[in-house]
Image (cartoon, grey):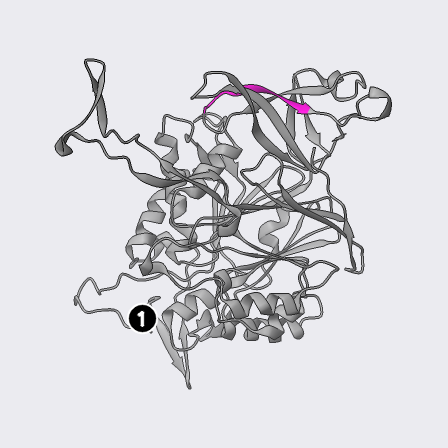
Amino acid sequence: MATTVLDEDLVRIWGNVRDPQTGKPKSRVLRLCFWGDELDLVEPAEATDENQKEVRVRVHSYRFRKKEIGVIRKRKERGGKFAPLRLRTGHLLEVTFIDVQQGDATVIRTPDRKLIVVDGGEQKFIARLLASMFPDTTPRTPLEIDSLVITHGDADHFTGLHEVAKAADHTDHRELHARILSYYHNGLVKAAPKDPVSGKSVSEKAAFGKFKQVGKETYAIELWDDPCAAPSKNRPFTDWCAALDRMRVPGKTVVRRLQYGDDDAFAAFRPAVDVQVLGPVVETVDGRPALPFLASSASHTINGHSVVLRLGYGNVHFLLGGDLNTHAEERLRHHIDADPNRTLRSEILKVPHHGSHEFEQAFLDQIHPVVSVVSSGDENAAKEYVHPRANLMAALGRASRGPMPLVYCTELAAFFAYRDFIEPEQHREVDGVLKPLPPTQRRRGFHAFERLVWGAVRVRTDGERVLTAVESASATVKEAYAFRVDTGGNVTGDDFQLL
């Protein structure tokens, strides 16, 4: 048994399963692997043996908590020989943008195998994907999240992490044991909607606790290093604090508020990956840190003061924009213009605020991305915000660079099957004769969507070459793109291969 790293772009791992209708073995793709994935080879020599047409690997099944034996079919060359399976010794930077319906969740694995999770959506998707990515966790060997970053305190960015804490109680393939080594946030804690003493509704200005009026500006002046210490918290924050307590490592987990320039919080990831903190931009009021209200709105304020991260690995940079809005983008852009050591320019952009109409074209122009990823999804009419907006998608096109700019949307990367979950029964055989059942005895089937493919946009890079790819339900039709970035940020296209 040998674990190694894949140096092919996209590789299908095939296996035989019984067809439920015919009972006969049927070949299907057990898993699609991407550049940089680890492979568990049954016999390493098969990878280079020109007479072996297949390489046997052990893979975790999507449906069961066990490993199956699958095969990779090698390329056939002239003369009947088979090309070697390309492998590498070092890991890549792996960034996965996950479809969590309405919300954000990004999973980052560094070349030295540290793990950063930025936001967690609102439902179970982040827990299920992490359980799939890391299937062998136990209470004694938990998944260690080196840094968990909650860009801001909206439920669609953090309540899904409650499910990560609860997944330790599962007994099926979704079981997950996780520990958090550091937890970062923007310092704003949403208060309970009503004052516990007076019973009156909390005003917009008091949505984050104490505030200060300075001229025409209103500032939130109660910024918390540990949000769980805030005396008044709404229900999502209260639940999250319980989940955080469950995943803390006593005496070890760091909980900290971030602001512009706090790059030292990510010093442990250097030199492999450089992480800059570009937001929120904090001001000082009466000698204490403060954040101005934006558009006189609590929702605009907590969105606009999102934690903004810029990751750099070699020539390739990622900008994770939280839920920045027009006011915040303009404010951040002017702040960075005055800082000779900072820039917004990045090759991959996690588009702010799910593709909202509240964006600034000049902000997107300064980023000048090659790849833009919109994290959005539809759940119900109560959460319909018409994301992403058509004008935002067009603006991304205008701001993009390279020979073939790319715009992804996480909800379009998922694949759903529409099928009967219970076979309808309208007739029954009686004494060898098929007779219709009375209406009261008929069993009706129901139709539903089943998610067959994760809505995940995967970006892999060695610091120069970049591969972006999504899964599909087809064994033959896959979408991926590759390009290279030089030291000056110039982009050239590259080919990708499906094996």
Q: Residues within 10 Å of mark 1 (few under 14, many from 20)?
A: some
Circle 1 residue: 206
Relative vertical location of residue 374 with respect to residue 468 in this rendering, above or below: below
- Main structural element of the magenta stretch: helix, strand or loop? strand
Helix, strand or loop at disc 1?
A: loop
**Residue 11 lies in quadrant:** top right
Q: Is 19 one of the magenta-colored residues?
A: no
Q: Is 67 one of the magenta-colored residues?
A: yes
Q: Which of these two is toward me, 189 or 351?
A: 351
Q: Which of these two is toward me, 297 or 258?
A: 297
Look at 50% across and 45% down and name the residue there: 414
User: Disc 1 residue type?
Assistant: Ala
Look at 39% across and 58% down and name the residue there: 154
**Residue 485 lies in quadrant:** bottom right
Residue found farthest to the bottom: 215
What percent of the width, then of the height, locates residue 59? 57, 24
What percent of the width, then of the height, locates residue 362? 62, 74
Look at 69% across and 20% down and name the residue there: 55
What percent of the width, then of the height, locates residue 114? 60, 39
Quadrant into which the N terminus falls: top right
The span picked out in magenta is 64-72
Left or right, 194 with respect to 282, comes to left
Relative vertical location of residue 361 with respect to residue 277 in this rendering, above or below: below
Image mark count? 1
Residue found farthest to the front: 433
Residue found farthest to the top: 431
**Residue 221, can we see it?**
no
Left or right, 359 with respect to 275, comes to left
Look at 40% across and 46% down and name the residue there: 160
